[in-house]
Every structure is written in C-alpha cells, then in structure tokens.
Amino acid sequence: MALPVGAVFAEPVKAAAPEPSAVNSVLIEAARREGKVALYSAMDITLSEKLAKAFEAAYPGIAVRVERSGAERIFQRIGQEQASRVQAVDVVLSTDAAHFVAWKRSGWLAPYVPEDAARYFPPDALDADGMHASVCASLSVIGYNTNLINSENAPRSFADLLDPKWRGRLVKGHPAYSGTILTATFAMVHALGWSYFEKLARQRVMQVQSASDPPKKLALGERAVQVDGADAILLQLKQQGQPVDAVHASEGSPLITTPGGIFRNAPNPNAARLFQSFLCGVEGQQVFIDGNRHVFHAPLAKSKTGRAPLSAVKLLKSDPAEVDAQSEEIKARYAKLFGV
C-alpha cells in the first residue's frame, strides 16, 4: 500500500499498549474545551452521521465534522495531508483494516485503549500496541433482486456466477475505491485464485465504486445479481421493502473488519479520545448494530433479533498485513482484467 512520495514519517511507536482509559469528567471537560472532533469515515454516510449525532447528544458542546469517502480515497487523502503536515484528522474509521497496518508502520497513530474495548472486546479486535480497535464488522455477500430471480434459481456460490446465464446481469464494486471490496477481492483471490477473476471478467460485469452501490443497483433492477457488496446495505434495503435478498456463498463470505483509531497529530486529541471511547462503548456499539453491522462488544450491546451471528456463517478471513502488502498489485491486476 503505497504512501505519497515525500511523505513525512514520524518515529514508529513500538511501546506496549497503554493501560485502558475510562471516560471521566476530566476527559469530558477537556474535550468540551476543544469543542469539536473530525471524523474521517469510510462507513456509509447514513451510519457515519448517526454516529456523529449520537455522540453530540451524549456530549453536548462537542461538534462532529464527518468527512466521508471510500476507504481508498480516505487513505490517499490522509497520506497527502500528512506529507503536507496538515493536521486535520482526529479519528478515522476505515473498512480496509490494512490501512491501519500502514499508518501504524508510519508512526501516525496514537496509542489509546478505551476501557470498554479492553473489558469486552476479544483480543483479536484490539491492536497489541493499542493503536486501534475493530469497532464493527460486516460481510461482503452475493445478493439478488427477488423480482427478477426467485430464491430457487438464485446463485449459491461464487462458482455459480460464472454460469453464462448471468452474463451482463452482474454488478461488482471496485477495489481501487472501496476498502470493503478490496478486502473481499483479496479474500476471493486467496480462496479461488486469479483464474476465477479472469473468467468473471468475461461475464460483462457492471463496475461501480462503493460497497453500497451493488445493493442499490439490485434494488433499482439495473442488475439481477451482485458479486460483492456490503450486507448491511442489502439488509437495510430489504427492511425498507426493496426487492433484494442476500446469499452467503458456499465458499464463504469475506469478513470485513472496521478499525477505528486516533492520529498522533490530531488537532483535538481529547475529543478524539472521548469519541474513540464512545465508538467502543455500549451507545456507540448500539448505533453500529442498528446500522446492521456486527459488533464485538459482548455481552452488553444487544444484537438485532433474528440476525445470524458471525459464528453461524462460513467466513473468508483476511490478514490485514497481507492485504497491505498486496493491495497495489490487486488493484492493478483487477483493473487490467476488467478494463476499468
């Protein structure tokens, strides 16, 4: 994962994780004196703004400025800002966990461990040095339009998508824009090989950007089946009465974790710590749940009734360090295959 030429690198922080920090009156008052926090988010805009409003309601007097874009665009922007010594981002949420590998390596993250994360999150949801925590997760799933396809004829595997009957009827996100799609593509490459994508590229696949876009194309009836896309958006559309449904591929569904972290040169460090604690606390975790995300805060955050837990789904997991090492190759090879 390349960083801009001329980027300024801070000395990497290699100390062990700090002691967990509780939210107290001292932190709250310091955050209120700063009065604002800048959130760079790769989550969909609806969820990002709900997080901001919930935080503002919990802590009046602290305004949240949301900067929302695709994960890969956010990564580029932060790299450019750091290279120019622009101190603008306080907290970042990325759907590409590999970004935190790169940011940590560059020494750009600040160590901070919210008390809730230390007490309730599983160990693999926390960075060993306290640089970030996985605040939620989602899945990249196959989806289909229920007006165009009945459930009996819906594809059940990634292999099914290579059937000639789906030619010109598929939609897929792009790994150069979306962190969800980059991670999903990485997972599928490891499970199925590049030969699978060579065959998929012959299916005249509609290319879109965000992981939110394929479900929306299904709802509009512009395509019958999505190769990948955020399960949260697909479920949201279904709850709104749109003719869409999800399928967990028999090969496994790519797991997409979303870490959150604070930057070392954050202009509002106390508000950033308070916001990070909010994201990991019950209130923030419940906002993620209401937004159809999976969370790691157990047992206090209440999951949606009837939704299958991650433990019930066959998952394709990805090592963020490997994604970081291979991301540029994935983007380049993908673009060449699909001509986009």
Image (cartoon, rainbow, N blue to C red):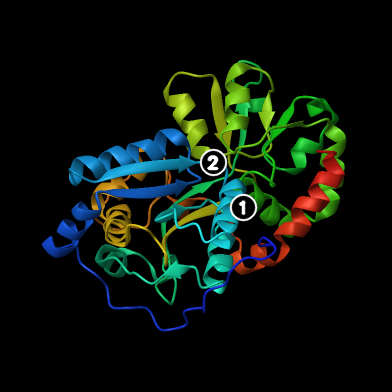
* Picture quadrant of residue 247: top right
> At which x and y percent is residue 163?
82, 33
Query: Mark 1 or mark 2, which is nearer the start of the sequence?
Result: 2
Classify residue 279 as left or right of residue 177. Answer: left
Q: Which secondary structure lies at badge 2?
A: loop
Circle 2 or circle 1, nearest the eye: 1
Res 69 label: 2
Residue at image point 27% right, 53% down: 278
Picture residue at 54% right of the left edge, 61% below the top: 82
The answer to which of 330 and 152 lies nearer the viewer is 330
Q: Position of residue 316 (x, y in %)?
A: 61, 56
Q: Nearer the viewer, residue 266 or 1?
A: 266
**Residue at the left extreme?**
25
Q: Nearer the viewer, residue 139 or 310?
A: 139
10 Å neighbourhood of mark 2: few (<14), some, or many (≥20)?
Answer: many
Callout 1 amino acid = Gln
**Residue sitting nearer the eye, 247 or 234:** 234
Q: Are marks 2 and 1 in contact (CB under 8 Å)?
A: no
Q: Which residue is mark 1?
A: 76
- Residue 3 lies left or right of residue 204; in this view the side is left
On screen, 42 above or below 258?
above
Please say whether residue 12 is visible from this viewpoint.
yes
Q: Secondary structure at mark 1?
A: helix
Distance from label 2 to label 1 (Cα)? 11 Å
Q: Quadrant of residue 117?
A: bottom left
Farthest bottom residue? 15
> Could you say which disc has been placed on residue 228 in the image?
none
